[in-house]
Amino acid sequence: MRALCRFAWATLVVNIGVIVFGAFVRATGSGAGCGASWPGCNGQLIPSDLEGARAIEFTHRATSGLALIMVAILVWRVWRSRPVGHPARKGAAFSAVFILGEALIGAMIVLYEWVADDASAARAAAVPLHLVNTLLLLGALTLTAWWLSGGGAIRLDRNRTFANWWIAGAAGLVLIAATGAITALADTLFPPESFLEGLREDFTATEHFLTNLRVAHPIVAITVSVYLFWLARRFGREGPVLRPAALAIMILVGGQLVAGALNVALLTPIWLQLLHLALADVLWVALVLFGAQTLGEREVVEPVSV
């Protein structure tokens, strides 16, 4: 089953890549590259004139299709190779549900034309919803891969105190993602000319509501980041050393705070936006693995008779 385990981790990595590329589509204003047409591009399955925004949007749709196919293959292989009741089956099933949710939300955004320069309240609601569903997808894929790697079923009663703190941390990271999505949208639609200009817009009542919401993200991000660092340090020890996932959380939290500060100072260059999102996705994966390592039962492997 090593091949299936490697495929599960590869599926997770591909989905992270697709998510980051989706942010590139938003940051470059290429969401309308295929018009109000889905799943085709301007009414064609494969458009002949691939250039500019159309090429970027079509590439994102093609890679999203690849991610969907990989998840479908993962579900099929897990259900064929794992017995009824194995936790990987449940993880694969949830992965299928959430990647279908990704496709449906993406289709809704395109068909209702909540793309490019649209600054409606509907788009402001759809974008964070999309990102929250993305985190749920990554969480399901992470657990599926972890269970296929030998992890056992997760039981919250193994360490109820940790479970409560961990759930709070996961909820906080989801809140960071939601506020970050709104902030990224505001920075794309209403890019400030300078740091001081952006700060003034954040607190000016006559500005667009999206710019006024930008200030929420750094406040939430700093608060939750400090909490996650404490959580990893407090519960991450297994013997004299930190669990790898706990150490990763502490390092990634520091990296995220630096990337966030640079984003503000440098007026959100696209490359830094993508790095910031990629680090956030990896931090989420590390947090899910941290919970699984702490709350998961050890899988009992039956000896093989020769």
Image (tube, rainbow, N blue to C red):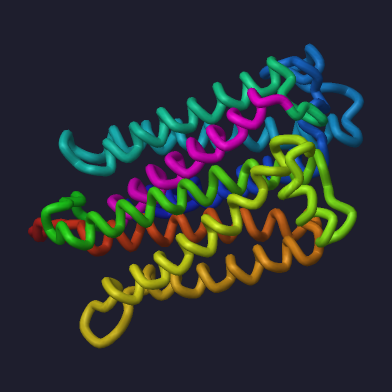
Q: Where's residue 149, x and y in %?
A: 31, 57
217 horizontally vs 139: left or right: right
Q: Is residue 126 magenta?
A: yes
Picture quarter containing residue 89? top left
Q: Is residue 38 visible?
A: yes
Q: Is residue 301 visible?
A: no
Locate the C terminus by quadrant: bottom left
Image height of 33 relative to 271, above or below: above
Q: At 68% across and 31% down in the image, what residue appears?
A: 61
Overall secondary structure of the magenta section: helix
Say left or right for 302 vs 13.
Answer: left
| Occupied quadrant, residue 74 | top left
Q: For the point 24% across and 55% down, which residue is it?
A: 164
Picture mark count: 0
Q: Is residue 290 above or below residue 239?
A: above
User: Picture coordinates of residue 211 (x, y %)?
Assistant: 73, 43
| Of 188 and 193, the residue lying toward us | 193
Residue pushed farthest front? 205
Q: Nearer the viewer, residue 192 or 160?
A: 192
The region drawn magenta spans 120-149
